[in-house]
Every structure is written in structure tokens, then in C-alpha cells.
Image (cartoon, rainbow, N blue to C red):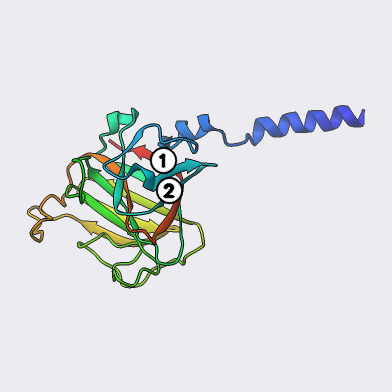
Amino acid sequence: MKRFTAILALSIGAILFPTLTVADDKDDGWVSLFDGETLKGWEANEKPECFKAGGGILTVEGGMAHLFYVGPVRKHDFKDFEFRCEVKTFPHANSGIFFHTENRGRGLVRKGYEAQINNSYAADPRKTGSLVIIDDRKESPVKDNDWFDYHIIVKGKQIVLKVNGKTIVDYTEPAEPKRPKGRELRVLSSGTFAIQAHDAKSKTLFRKIRVKPLD
């Protein structure tokens, strides 16, 4: 009788308090962009050895390069969205997440915006949470060696960057944004995401990379 009661209680609990599953996550609008074990759906514009996948983690290190999402979700073309991932940096790490961008081959990424990742890289004053060049922050809200949540929201002309739930940047693009020479394409349009590898001494980890289209 006791065993039957316990089984009945577990069954009722499973109905009332179901465990979050991948299906539940998708029903909420979030879709994974990274399978945790391979780079399927991603391509580097150069130096593919800078990007390695395994154990649920994307490891980024070894030199300047960018890894672009080219997978099937929305045909890798996003306009209004929420993007989230978890990030861990090590001392001297410098990285970034580009959005509304595209792979134009070797070299720097010209199109789109960059959400900065830099907790302790002294050569660059722009710290984690900066919308690079547009709204730069001199202090990082997080530290190396700790996982943190990076949340990027783009809706209409508004860009919001959150770190561990705290809003760091809330920027609205003006009708005719002025950009420095060489950064003229740093404006809202549409496009994919790219993750930056920065230099030989930089090491950054990413996991739970996902998107929630809003358009």
C-alpha cells in the first residue's frame, strides 16, 4: 500500500510539476543554435582551429577569427530577437558576440553590432556589457573564471544588453546614426550571429547558445 501511494504521488507530481524539456523550451520560443558536441551549423571566416566543441562547450582561443552561425534556424537571418548564452572568460580573454552580421571572408567583421566580452584584457578599455564603439563601459560587471549569462535583445531600433539579468546598455538607434570611418555598417538591419576569437592568449568558453525570434 505504501509503495502504491508513493508511485501515485510521483505520478501526480509529474503531471502538476513537469520537468523542463527541450520541447518546453521550444514551446517558449527559444531554439538552440549549438549542439554542444560539434560545430554543425557554424563556420569560421578563417583559422577554424580557434573553435572547438565538446562536452556542451564551445572553446574559443588561439588568434583573431570569427565563427558565424550559418544553420537552418530562420535561414540564419534574424532581425528582432532575444539571444542568450553563458560565457566564462579566463585572464586576458577578449571576445565578442556580433549580431545583424554576415560572413564576408577573412578579416575584421564590418557589418553589424558587437556585444563586448572583456573582463581583464587591459589593452582594450571596453569591458563586458559594452555595445562596442556605440556605448562603451569601462568596468566589467563580472569576473574571470565564473560563468555568466549574456542576454542580447533587439526589437525595432532598440538594443538591450544584459549581464546576469542586469541591464548594462539600453540603446536606441537614431534615424541617421553617425559612425566612424570603417564602421559605417555598424547599424541595425538583419543578419546572423558571430563569435569572436581575439588573440593567442585569449580563451573564452560558451555554452547554451540559443535564440528567440521576435518578428
Give percent across and percent down for residue 170: 28, 59
Q: Which residue is mark 1?
A: 210
Residue type, mark 2 in image = Cys
Quadrant that contains the N terminus: top right
- Residue located at (34% from left, 57% from top): 95
Callout 2: 10 Å neighbours few (<14), some, many (20+)?
some
Q: Residues within 10 Å of mark 1 (few under 14, many from 20)?
A: some
Q: Earlier in the sequence, mark 1 or mark 2?
A: 2
Depth check, front residue: 40 or 20: 40
Q: Is residue 83 above or below residue 203?
A: above
> In the depicted view, which residue is nearer to us: 180 or 200?
200
Tell me: residue 145, above or below residue 67: below
Q: Residue at x 34, y 42 (%)?
A: 48
Residue 121 position, x and y percent, is 36, 68
In the displayed structure image, the side of residue 193 where residue 52 appears, left or right: right
The kind of residue on which mark 1 rests is: Arg
Q: Quadrant of residue 180?
A: bottom left
Q: Name the element at disc 1.
A: strand
Q: Is residue 214 left or right of residue 177?
A: right
Q: Report the Cα–Cα distance between label 1 and label 2.
A: 6 Å
Q: Are marks 1 and 2 in contact (CB under 8 Å)?
A: yes
Task: Give the vertical position of 50 relative to 124 (above or below).
Answer: above
Identify the residue under disc 2: 85
Disc ID at residue 115:
none
Q: Position of residue 113 (x, y in %)?
A: 23, 52
Q: Is residue 214 above or below residue 111?
A: above
